[in-house]
Image: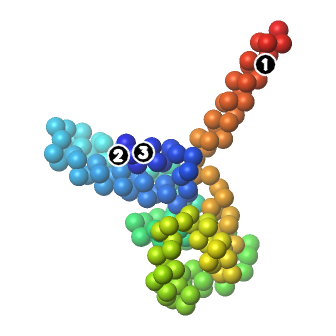
Amino acid sequence: IKINTAKIDSDRTLLSDVPQKFYLVKEEIIKILPISFVIEEEQKLILEMVDYRKIFCCQGIHYAANILDPCFKGIILSEYKDTEGINLIVDTVNKFDSARILANLAQYRANENIWENESIWESSKNISPLTWWSGLMNNQPLYAIVKILFFIPALSAAPERVRSAFGNTHKIKKKIDQ
């Protein structure tokens, strides 16, 4: 649980990682709770807290990125979350060539055409999703959306640390100038 929570807070976390990490955290908690000393009522509260935190942290953009991450392909998403991710893709697609991109999404999810090759999927396990799309799939219509989604930081922690560091530097400079 601690490892996955730390990974969620990491600067290297991608949008697609967030739903996956919450899924893993919940799975670990579900395994641990029955052998813990926590009473049943508290167990339910713990699971509700995890679900609440996931709702707070995961939005359509995370689900869309999870769907387009070749390592995940949205496999762990519920039907509702999958639909939420696809709706975000559709909303983004309206700015581009929607028919081609949605057809491409269908082929991607069904492992058809270029995605029939198993070695293409194997390669995704060794590199970042953006590198995979940029290096192997940059001629695919979905790439226009992938470029947008995988450049967005998953969390605001890194920019907040930079702002905080700048703020502290600014305070020190003000003290020195006085």
Given residues 49 and 76, the one toward you in this image is 76
Secondary element at tag 3? helix
Position above or below: 79 against 39: below
| Rendering quarter of residue 87 | bottom right
Given residues 113 and 49, the one toward you in this image is 113
Residue depth check, mark 1 versus mark 3: number of the one nearer the observer: 1
Residue 104 percent coordinates (x, y): 60, 83
Q: According to the image, label 1 marks what residue?
A: 173
Looking at the rendered structure, the kind of residue marked 3 is: Thr
In this image, 160 relative to 127: left or right? right
Residue 118 percent coordinates (x, y): 46, 83
Q: According to the image, label 3 marks what residue?
A: 5
Residue 49 percent coordinates (x, y): 37, 43
Secondary element at tag 1? helix
* Mark 1–mark 2 distance (CA, rounded to whole Å): 41 Å
- Quadrant in which the C terminus is drawn: top right
Q: Residue at x 29, y 51 (%)?
A: 28
Secondary element at tag 2? loop
Give neighbour class at mark 1: few <14, some 14-19, many 20+ (Cα, 10 Å). Answer: few
Marks 2/3 in contact by CB < 8 Å: the verdict is yes
| Rendering quarter of residue 102 | bottom right
